[in-house]
Amino acid sequence: MLQTTKKTIIKETAKKMVSRENKKAALHDKLQLLRSVTNSHATKDSSILIDASKYIEDLKQKIDILNEDIARSSSYSWPMVTVETLEKGIQVNVYSERSCPGLLVFVLKVFEEFSLNVLEARVSCTGSFQLEALGVESEENGETIDTHLVKQAVLQAIQDWNESNDQE
């Protein structure tokens, strides 16, 4: 009976030692992974953790800087553009929360480039900019106009208008 108890104790101790070794190996693997992710050259476990902590602080600072950049850039609202095909022609809508002096000329050049005749248009430039225009394809063109291409051209016109305003 004493022999059985001794064997059981030895088995239990061996299991605990193996379990401890497995945990230690798993921890070591995780620390090495952390070391590689954080580009740490440390060899001591505590130094790896310190480097990881510094890495996290650097990431937090970068996030703060990016959030500040986003906040700064979002103070300028880029005009919204929608272009859709209607039974009569192509409907182009451009809206900006702020006034955009001169933008109308740039957008109408797009109509000209695509040989679109303006059938109906509503424009407001008081405090904000809003354009609703219905363009129809000119008779001599005959091709169907891709609304995606028109939208890209309007967005490019807005970009060109913005750059021309930055230079002034």
Image (tube, rainbow, N blue to C red):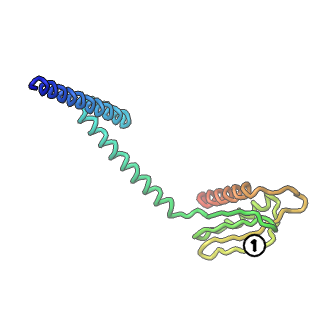
- Above-or-below relation of 147 to 126: above
Q: Give x and y (percent) for residue 123.
A: 70, 74
Q: Closer to the camera, 39 or 19?
A: 19
Q: Residue at left 34%, top 45%?
A: 56
- Name which quarter of the figure residue 38 lies in: top left
Q: Residue at left 43%, top 56%?
A: 67
Judge from the rendering whether residue 117 lies leftward or rightward of residue 163; answer left or right: right
Q: Closer to the camera, 58 or 15?
A: 15
Quadrant location, the N terminus:
top left
Q: Give x and y (percent) for residue 60.
A: 36, 49
Q: How many labels does the image show?
A: 1
Q: Residue at left 20%, top 31%?
A: 16
- Name which quarter of the figure residue 51 lies in: top left
Q: Give x and y (percent) for residue 91.
A: 74, 66
Q: Which residue appears farthest toward the front when viewing the image?
A: 1
Q: Which residue appears farthest toward the right when viewing the image?
A: 140
Circle 1 SS class: strand
Q: Which residue appears farthest toward the bottom when viewing the image?
A: 126
- Name which quarter of the figure residue 144 lies in: bottom right
Q: Residue at left 20%, top 28%?
A: 17
Label 1 packing within 10 angstroms: few (<14), some (14-19), many (20+): few
Q: Which residue appears farthest toward the left when viewing the image?
A: 2
Judge from the rendering whether residue 108 lies leftward or rightward of residue 62; answer left or right: right
Q: Closer to the camera, 165 or 53?
A: 53
- Above-or-below relation of 75 to 50: below
What residue sits right under mark 1 in the picture?
Answer: 121
Q: What residue type is labelled 1?
A: Ala
Quadrant location, the C terminus:
bottom right
Q: Give x and y (percent) for residue 101.
A: 64, 68
